[in-house]
Amino acid sequence: MKRLQLDDCGFSSALNAIGGKWKTSILWEIHLKPRRFGELKRLLAGISEKVLAQQLREMEADGLVRRDVFPGPVPKVEYSATEMGLSLNSAVTVLAEWGKRHEQRLASARSA
């Protein structure tokens, strides 16, 4: 994924963190509770394993997701939101609420 340059207002940095079709959905699911890869794959209908793995790696590199490995005969891996990921989820929730409030108007404006 192409990374954006730093900007004065921080908006590009925020968009970069949630860029990608699935990142906000992944963040939503793991903010509720830690999730395993297979569980995320089932919850996010339509996402491929390749894309899920890529998006999780990017989010982990950005400090939004924590990957915990639990040793055992079959190692168990769980993904959870970090403190920074939780704060981003709060910001995205506000943006989603704005979108819901204005979606009819935006759709009408686009079709006109």
Image: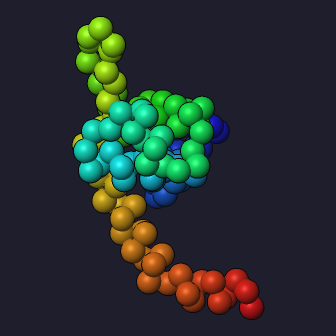
What's the image's color scheme? rainbow
Q: Position of residue 86 (x, y in %)?
A: 28, 49
Q: Position of residue 102 (x, y in %)?
A: 50, 84
Seen as rendered, the residue at the extreme top is: 73
Say how many tags the image has: 0
Q: Position of residue 5 (x, y in %)?
A: 58, 43
- The residue positioned 52% from the left and 31% from the top of the image is 53
Q: The C terminus is located in which quarter?
A: bottom right
- The answer to which quarter of the image holds residue 90 is bottom left
Looking at the picture, does residue 70 appear above or below residue 87? above
In the image, 76 versus 32, the foreground residue is: 76
- The residue positioned 60% from the left and 83% from the top of the image is 106
In the image, 78 versus 54, the foreground residue is: 78
Q: The N terminus is located in which quarter?
A: top right
Looking at the picture, does residue 4 appear above or below residue 70? below
- Left/right placement of residue 102 relative to residue 110 reads left
Seen as rendered, the residue at the extreme right is: 112
- The residue positioned 57% from the left and 44% from the top of the image is 47
Q: Is residue 32 visible?
A: yes
Q: Is residue 58 visible?
A: no
- The residue positioned 42% from the left and 33% from the top of the image is 37
- Left/right placement of residue 61 relative to residue 31 reads right
Looking at the picture, does residue 52 appear above or below residue 91? above
